[in-house]
Amino acid sequence: MSDTPEHELSMPRPAGDKQPLKCNVYEYARTLVSTLTPMFPYVDEGAMVPTIALFYGQPGGDYGYFEHENTVDEVAIVFGSGATTGRGKAGLVRASARSHGVGNLLSEPDSPESFSLVSVTQRQSTGVQQKEAVAFTCASCSTEIYREEFDSTPPRRGMQKDEVGPVGHLHTIYGSARTALNYNADEKNRTCPKCGNVNAPFPLGRWGWDRYRDMTDIIREAHQSLSETASAAE
Ligand SMILES: [Zn+2]
């Protein structure tokens, strides 16, 4: 028996400005354009943000590896896996350290048999800055060779629409996309100062972050265009 008083165990009522929503992991996973796509539209202060990533093997399907630093906790749940052991295996739940490696989840990234369906949930900061960093390491000697930090402070509570418009986005994906594109753009960024190895570009296409960002921009324009058409018709 818990000593916690009954009233502290009951969930508070939903906030008036946030419609309770549900989303099926398996249905939603089929529509993903990116890893880490948020399942729900709320990304403001204090919001729980569950995201989904589907990693799947294919010829030349390596996902590469990077280091991620986040000022908020991330909880991963693996909702299914095939031909994969270790961190990508179905049923695993884990809370990541604030600084953690990401990638190498599939046992055989080149095999179509291999997959892992993972949700990663973070809770947005309230009243304090939220910061992240993405870094790449040398494939030959593991020295960190490129790093970008970015500010991911969420929209103020209840101000998401005013601050980012009717279509929200998860800033983690934007910051990661920019970091990977900058890293890939110049061979100097990928050259290890310690051992001289010129590292291959990060396989951004496998993660889809730039696609998520570009599609968000287009969808915002789509929303805007219909609003303009509707205003013109009045
Ligand atoms: Zn090196």
Image (cartoon, rainbow, N blue to C red):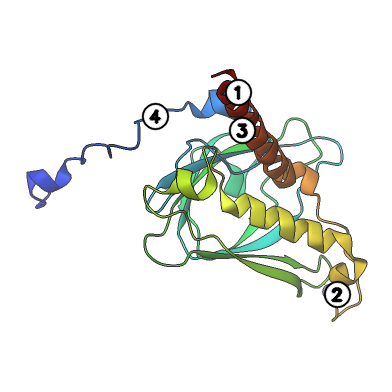
Foreground residue among 160 and 138: 160
- As shown in the figure, which amino acid type bears the numbered disc 2? Cys
Label 3, secondary structure: give it. Answer: helix
Label 2, secondary structure: give it. Answer: loop
Q: Which mark is residue 120?
A: none
Reading the image, the residue beneath label 4 is: 21
* Lateral position of residue 50 relative to residue 144, left or right: left
Reading the image, the residue beneath label 1 is: 232
Using the numbered discs, state the Cα–Cα distance from disc 1 to disc 2 in whole angstroms.
Answer: 57 Å
**Dot 4, crowdedness within 10 Å: few (<14), some or many (≥20)?**
few
Residue at (46% x, 28% y) in the render: 23
Foreground residue among 223 and 121: 223
Using the numbered discs, state the Cα–Cα distance from disc 2 to disc 3 in whole angstroms.
Answer: 45 Å
Residue at (79% x, 43% y) in the render: 205
Which mark sits nearer the N-terminus, 4 or 1?
4
User: Is 170 above or below relative to 115?
Assistant: below
Which mark sits nearer the N-terminus, 2 or 4?
4
Mark 2 or mark 4, whichever is nearer to me: 4
Q: Which mark is residue 192?
A: 2
* Lateral position of residue 145 relative to residue 49, left or right: right
Label 4, secondary structure: give it. Answer: loop
